[in-house]
Image (tube, helix red, strand yellow):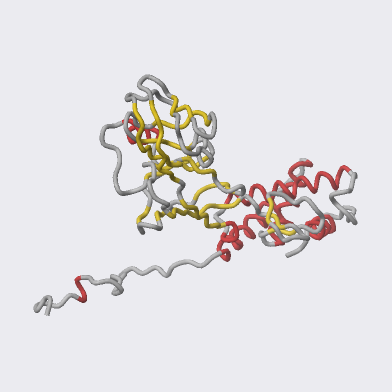
Amino acid sequence: MATMLALIQQAAAEMSLAVPATVVSNTTQDVVQQYALLNAVGYELQRKHQWEALCTEYRFSTSFASLAGTTVAGSPVVTGISSTAALEAGTWMVTGIGIAQDTYILSVDSLTQVTLSQNASATGTSTLNWGKTKYPFPTDYDRIINRTQYDKSKHWEMLGPSTPQQWQWLKSAYISTGPRVRWRPMGGKLQIWPQMGTAEYLGFEYLSKNWAIDGTTRASKASFLADADTCIFPDRLMILGLKRKYFEIKGFDTSRFDRDYDQEFDLAVSHDSGAPTLSLSPRLSSILIGWENIPDSNYGS
């Protein structure tokens, strides 16, 4: 992989422009523009295809707690909690005697008291079930990959993404829970339903926004920030993308560059990852028991 400096130097030479010795610290307007345009190429490529280098797995365990608390009918305040250290406002839900459905922690007032989003309907002290239902996405998250969401503890696919209408039905209807975890991205978080009472191990795959690679630490990031940085995209594709954008911004004809860039992009996509072998007469899998390997008689003998 060529460095960001090498990419701009190659593109500049091919366009008969002055070849810069540095880029990031360079104050020449033309070089500043090429630097910005090369980053723009990276931003656009990151969104155009599900690049295998950007496919990332995310795993986490659900947080929960069973803590006694004292409620008063008509009041949202819960007192007498042994410790609120693990609880968090806005992301933790609570269920129990006198607690209405879809009730969240509005604020953590002290080490023994919280305020809920709804008033309690009963007075007394009882064990309440607390659980986190809103989880932040990874810091490099860009977009989710469909049908990769699983409850790994139960070996079941999570159901979703729920629509806004389905989500409100789940949170508000009389019967809205079941053995399967429902999910929805909302408010910059992954929201799940119902509230978990155990440490369920959940996970999904997503596309990272970090297409650039730090030239020193090799850490991924979302832009070229130094001359020594590299990226996950093919060098030639980046060079052609820069040349096309440079000619376009200058008002020149880009038809030749469009052809070269599109051809290189198609090649990069086709070479990015493997593809299944398709058949016009597929056969059923013989890994699990099916009609093709069940005996005609003598079942159980």
Residue 36 quadrant: top right
Which of the two residues, 122 or 12, is positioned nearer the viewer here? 122
Residue 274 sits above or below residue 16 on the image: below
Which of the two residues, 221 or 60, is positioned nearer the viewer here? 60
Residue 198 position in % (x across, y down): 39, 50
Residue 58 position in % (x across, y down): 52, 54
Q: How many marks?
A: 0
Which of the two residues, 181 or 196, is positioned nearer the viewer here? 196
- Specify the farthest residue to the left: 297
Residue 191 quadrant: top left
Residue in the picture at 79% in, 42% down: 250
Left or right: 15 with respect to 206? right
Residue 66 quadrant: top left
Residue in the picture at 41% in, 52% down: 200
Residue in the picture at 58% in, 50% down: 48
- Specify the farthest residue to the top: 74
Left or right: 164 with respect to 190? left
Residue 112 sits above or below residue 270 on the image: above
Quadrant, the C terminus: bottom left
Left or right: 43 with respect to 61? right
Residue 243 position in % (x across, y down): 75, 52
Residue 255 sits above or below residue 1 on the image: above
Quadrant, the N terminus: bottom right
